[in-house]
Amino acid sequence: MAKVKKMFLLGLMALVPAACSEQQAGTGQEREGAQTILRQVDFAQVSRGGVLFAKHCAECHGDNAQGAVNWRQRDAEGMFPPPPLNGTGHAWHHPQSTLFDVIKEGSPVGMGRMPAWKGRLSDEEITAIIAWFQSRWTDEVFAAWYQTDQRAKAGL
């Protein structure tokens, strides 16, 4: 079986050991059919992302990234409410570049009310926020997302 290295982001900030330094990383493996995906954890990045998420994102997406209950239904103004980012919504259907761009540039016109965070969050902070919410994804969701991300990187 081929092993593929990829970011693994731990499930809960509370599980991040205080003793871990920024250079330390843990790993977990997920099964994806016959392929094993090796996820690497940057505990400091996930922790930083959780703090940033709580400060900038939780108001709309919920403390646990659960999103709005009716996130699939347009509201009276034709906009979609904030989706879950915890792996139960559609965020995992999008490659890393799309997740990053939506946070940086905001919702596509007419789709939602996500503000553009460009100029308010650095690229590193946006990446840390993505790391945090991806850390909440199940192994199966992460494996499906990983395939999507790899196809996007290959231009497929």
Image (cartoon, grey):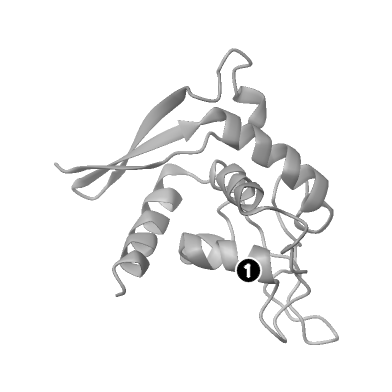
How far across and how far down the image is residue 30, in percent? Answer: 34, 40
Residue 145 sits above or below residue 51 on the image: below
Res. 5 image quadrant: top left
Residue 108 horizontal side relative to residue 76, left or right: left
**Residue 75, quarter of picture:** bottom right
The reply to whether residue 97 is visible in this rendering is yes
The x, y position of residue 153, in whole percent, is 34, 65
Residue at the limit of the structure toward the top, as seen here: 19
The C terminus is located in which quarter? bottom left
Residue for point 37% across, 55% down: 146
Residue 112 position within the rendered picture, expressed as x and y whole percent measured from the top left: 74, 77
At a point 38% along the width and 31% down the height, the residue shown is 28
Q: Residue at x 23, y 50 (%)?
A: 33
Q: Residue at x 48, y 44 (%)?
A: 138
- The residue pinned by badge 1 equals 102
The kind of residue tagged 1 is Val
Q: Quadrant of the N terminus?
A: top left
- Say if 138 sits above or below 112 in the image: above
Q: Secondary structure at mark 1?
A: helix
The vertical placement of 33 against 150, above or below, is above
